[in-house]
Image (cartoon, grey):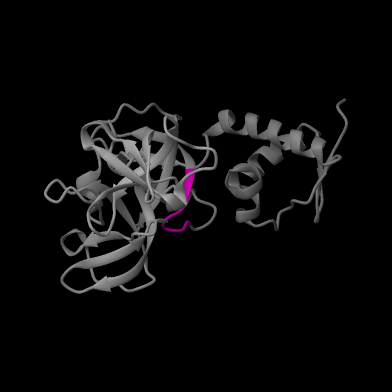
């Protein structure tokens, strides 16, 4: 059986001028237009496709991958706004994704980017988006453990820091005081559970705490130095963005690990680079 708004592995039933008709199970036959047919495919082939509805509400398939599927939260761009109907978002397919007026939280402009949830409207059976994020997040007490690695989507900013969606399921908070640089709404990144409070609220961090964080990062820096011939072009003035791109951690965490290596006499630091010292 095919799932609307998801990727599916479907078998080719027949070949026509319009394209392949795929076996959608209880959804019936689903057209894969000719422009999406992979080379070498034929009747009996099993294809990996995304199933949605075209502009005439017919079920169709594509081998393209949208920017978000049903059940996902994503950061999408507004392509156009239709008063009374809603806004159309770019989700990477030829048919744009509708954000109905009732699912908006404020006035939208063409070109604006916002975090939305993708779902199937039970009344119309169409795939649509919602900017009312709270209603789609899990309110049951989460079973996360301290220091558990998770995937985050930065979805909002507060006086305390940044609200993040954890694993497409829960709200969490990254405290501004623990960040080495501002974050951007829509960024996705790995993070860690710092604490689940008794009221169910979740504190997050971008790095592991204490020595648990420093030791593996120290090893990572040593490995990078070895691969770089004993030198790395990082120093006190290196930007947080450069450090996160290379090592996946904050500048604060990087400096802590680097300090540990310096005290252990494994590296030399100067104004332009880090140099590896031989083991004693």
Q: Quadrant of the C terminus?
A: top right
Residue at 47% in and 39% down: 191
Residue 86, percent from left and from top = 22, 66
Residue 176, percent from left and from top = 44, 53
Secondary structure mainly formed by the magenta segment? loop
Q: Determine which quarter of the picture holds residue 226.
A: top right
Residue 58, percent from left and from top = 24, 51
Judge whether 115 appears above or below 173 on screen: below
Judged left or right of residue 173, residue 236 is right
Residue 261, percent from left and from top = 74, 35
Closer to us: 185 or 214 = 185
Tell me if I can see residue 161 in this picture: no
Q: Quadrant of the N terminus?
A: top left
Judged left or right of residue 255, residue 84 is left
Closer to us: 191 or 179 = 191
Q: Is residue 187 magenta?
A: yes
Residue at 64% in and 30% down: 216
Tell me if I can see residue 128 in this picture: yes
Closer to us: 1 or 151 = 1
| Count of numbered marks | 0
Image: magenta residue range: 183-189
Q: Determine which quarter of the picture holds residue 267.
A: top right
Closer to us: 109 or 229 = 109
| Identity of the residue furthest to the left in this view | 123
Q: Is residue 262 magenta?
A: no
Judge whether 260 appears above or below 177 on screen: above
Residue at 37% in and 45% down: 16
């Amino acid at each position: 059986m095919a799932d609307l708004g998801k990727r599916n592995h479907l078998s080719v039933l027949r070949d026509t001028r319009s394209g392949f008709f795929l076996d959608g199970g209880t959804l019936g036959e689903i057209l894969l237009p000719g422009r999406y047919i992979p080379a070498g495919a034929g009747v009996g082939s099993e294809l990996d496709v995304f199933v949605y509805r075209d502009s005439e509400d017919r079920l169709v398939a594509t081998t393209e991958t949208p920017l978000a599927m049903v059940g996902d939260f994503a950061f999408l761009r507004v392509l156009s706004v239709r008063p009374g109907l809603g806004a159309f978002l770019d989700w990477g397919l030829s048919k744009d994704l509708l954000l109905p007026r009732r699912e908006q939280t404020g006035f939208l402009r063409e070109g604006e980017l916002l975090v939305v949830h993708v779902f199937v409207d039970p009344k119309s059976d169409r795939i649509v988006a919602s900017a009312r994020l709270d209603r789609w997040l899990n309110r049951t007490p989460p079973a996360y453990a301290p220091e558990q690695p998770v995937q985050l989507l930065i979805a909002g900013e507060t006086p305390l820091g940044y609200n993040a969606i954890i694993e497409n399921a829960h709200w969490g908070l990254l405290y501004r005081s623990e960040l080495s640089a501002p974050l951007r709404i829509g960024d996705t990144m790995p993070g860690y559970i710092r604490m689940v409070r008794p009221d169910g609220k979740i504190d997050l961090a971008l790095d592991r705490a204490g020595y648990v964080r420093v030791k593996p990062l120290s090893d990572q820096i040593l490995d990078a130095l070895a691969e770089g011939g004993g030198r790395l072009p990082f120093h006190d003035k290196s930007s947080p963005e450069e450090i996160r791109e290379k090592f996946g951690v904050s500048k604060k965490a990087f400096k802590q690990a680097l300090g540990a290596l310096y005290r252990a006499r494994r590296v030399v630091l100067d104004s332009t680079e880090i140099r590896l010292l031989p083991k004693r």
